[in-house]
Image: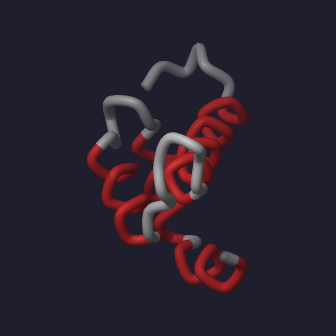
Amino acid sequence: MGEEIPLEARIFALCDAYDAIRSKRSYKEELSHLKAMNRIVADKNQHFDPDVVEAFLDCEKKILAIT
């Protein structure tokens, strides 16, 4: 991922995607935490900064505590 995209934007992109995957919408059902994490990891290096994904994975226990 290029450094031309601010770190804050890369973090927000991942968090927004996680929220969208987990949330029920009028056109889709919510998905589990595990499925959301699998999608994010699958998109590592493509859509998401690999360092941001790794930091997100490191925080998984904290995420589970608040979801």
Question: Residue, x 34% and y 42% (percent of image)?
Answer: 44
Q: Is residue 21 left or right of residue 26?
A: left
Say whether residue 64 is left or right of residue 46: right
Name the residue furthest top: 4
Quarter of the image for the C terminus: give it: bottom right
Q: Residue at x 32, y 35 (%)?
A: 45
Residue 47 position by quadrant: top left
Query: Residue 20: x, y in percent?
Result: 58, 46
For residue 16, side relative to residue 32 (left or right): right
As drawn, which residue projects farthest toward the left? 42
Residue ranking furthest to the front: 26
Identify whether 39 is placed above or below 43: below
The x and y percentages for residue 6 are: 68, 24
Can residue 34 be seen in this snapshot?
yes
Q: Position of residue 31 (x, y in %)?
A: 44, 62
Front in this rendered view, residue 34 or 24 = 24
| Image quadrant in which the N terminus is located | top left
Identify the residue at image location x=59%, y=14%.
4
Q: Nearer the viewer, residue 22 or 4?
A: 22
Task: Answer whether residue 55 is visible to the viewer in this image.
Answer: no
Q: Is residue 8 above or below residue 57?
A: above
Count of numbered tags: 0
Residue 63: where, in percent of width, then height? 62, 74
Foreground: 27 or 13? 27
